[in-house]
Each structure stands twice: as C-alpha cells, then as structure tokens.
Image: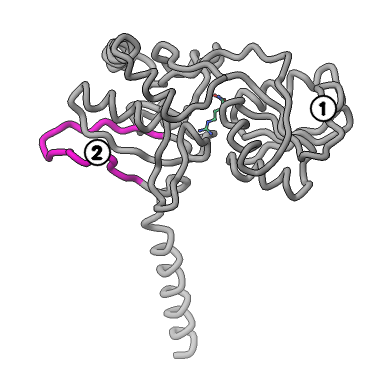
Amino acid sequence: MKKHLLLFIAFIGFFTILLSGCGTTGEEDSSENTDATSSEDKEVLEMATSADFAPFESRNEAGDIEGFDIDLANYIADELGYELKITDMKFDGLIGALQNERVDMVLSGMSTTEERKQNVDFSKEYHHSGEMFVTLKDSDITSVDDIEGKTVGVQLGTIQQTGAEKLQEDMDFEIKAVDNGPTLIQELISNRIDVAYMDKSVAKGYIEEQDLAGFDDPTSSSPGMGIAFPKGSELVDDVNEVLAQAEENGKLQELKDKWLSEE
Ligand code: ARG
C-alpha cells in the first residue's frame, strides 16, 4: 500500500513538472498586436524583434514595444494590407526563427552582413549607423589601443561580437558576450566589463541617459540595417517597394527625425 502511495505521489509530481513546462514558448516572452485598426479578415504578418535596442526597438514603461523599427514595420504592414504581429525574442535567435519560417520578417536593427545573407534574404538598407565603444565617464580607455588587457562586452550574435573577435586577432583582451542590450550597460556600470562595444545610434542614447563616455570605432565598416526574411520569401520585393516609396514620400525621414538623433 505504502509503495502504491509513493508511486502515486511520484506520478503526480511528474505531471506537475510536465504541465508547468507548458504555456511558455522558450525565449519568446510575448506576442502582441500593435495594429489598433486591425480587422479580422486581414492576413497576419508575423514579425520578430529583440526589443532591447532603443531607439530601434525597446519596451516603454507600459511594457509595449516601440521604436523606429516598430513604426516602420507598422507602416509596411499597413501599406501591404497586413495585420502586424510582433514576437519578442533574443537577438541571437532571430536568424533561426526566419530559417524555420516561424516568422515572416525580422526588423531588429539587423546589419546586412554577407554571412547572414547565406541564411536569410534582406531588403534594401533603411539605416546606417556605425559602432562605438562605451565606457564609464572616468575610464582610462579613450581609444581602441587602450582596450588591450581589458574586458570588452558585446551582445551575443551581433556584428559587434564578430567585430571584437576580429580585433582580438591583433590585440589581447577578453570578450564577454551577453544576451541583451540593457544587460551590457548594467555590466559596465557594475564594473564587470571595462567597455561595451555597440551600435552607435544605440550607444549615444545610453551615454546621454546614464552619463557615460565613449568614442567612435575607427575600424568599423559595417553594413547598414535591413529587414530580414526567410530565404526566397516573396515579401522581399513588396517590402522593397514600400521602402522606396517611404524614401520618396518622406516617411522614412519622418521616422528618423522622430527616433534617431543626428549622426
Ligand atoms: N546591428 C547589429 C547587428 O546586426 C546589432 C543589432 C542588435 N539588435 C537588437 N535588436 N538587439 O548585429
């Protein structure tokens, strides 16, 4: 009898664990519909982003995802007659989500590198930014030469990670790759890294907000940002047309004025 009771408890325990695993979909922590005028009969356009990259995509105080990429995605969806659905995930998982066709497109400040082009298709570029090294205000690191012997933080899966690895071929320093943007700045402020290597448009926001310092990366020649699609996606041409039109009618400039400070 006692044995049966034990078995029963083990059985219940097993199912509790199984059930608690349901309802979460891995790294994707939310889906939301940002299109206020959505109607039932519109086809859904599934977009993914990594909402840790202000001013391109981040969560506001209400927890909603906002930014340049989000406005641009909404504009594109509107123009093409889709209802936009946004999924937030780690930057490192975005290419995989496109490859598995779990989403239709990615707007995430993603640079159109040759390496990525082997796995996804890109729209034409909609912005070009550059890189910066961000430090604490009183830091003795004021140029790339000073990173020798230091710890450089980057976001996992970004071109800044690849860029830092390339720099490492000629210099001796450590790289610490973290999952998300705000964590990187947290690491810097709490002295767990000496310098953060990141996108310039994003860095400038942190430098101002958190009273940090920084300098441009003289080595950087990174490509601009594009919208990414699964390879062979028919959306590429349509979206390129909308982008060309947005360039012509001033919409793109309007969004740049709204979200990005001058370079
Ligand atoms: N432009 C860089 C890259 O493509 C960083 C993009 C990071 N984007 C983000 N949403 N965290 O690798």
Residue type (three-letter) at the residue carrying disc 1: Thr
Callout 2 secondary element? loop
Residue found 77% across the figure and 41% down from its top: 193
Circle 1 Cα neighbour tier, 10 Å, few/some/many (<14 / 14–19 / ≥20):
some
Residue type (three-letter) at the residue carrying disc 2: Asp
Q: Quadrant of residue 8?
A: bottom left
Coordinates of residue 171 in the picture (x, y in percent): 85, 21
Task: Look at discs 1 and 2 and give the one toward the viewer.
Answer: 1
Residue 45 magenta-highlighted: yes
Coordinates of residue 184 in the picture (x, y in percent): 66, 41
Q: Quadrant of residue 259?
A: top left
View extreme (left): residue: 41
Callout 1 secondary element? loop
Q: Quadrant of ligand 1?
A: top right
Q: Quadrant of residue 155?
A: top right
Q: Give the quadrant of the N terminus.
A: bottom left
Residue found 28% across the figure and 15% down from its top: 242
Q: Nearer the viewer, residue 25 or 174?
A: 174
Coordinates of residue 112 in the picture (x, y in percent): 51, 15
The region drawn magenta spans: 31-48
Relative vertical location of residue 177 with respect to residue 166 in this rendering, above or below: below
Relative vertical location of residue 91 with respect to residue 236 in this rendering, above or below: below
Q: Which residue is mark 1?
A: 142
Coordinates of residue 187 in the picture (x, y in percent): 71, 46
Q: Which residue is mark 2?
A: 35
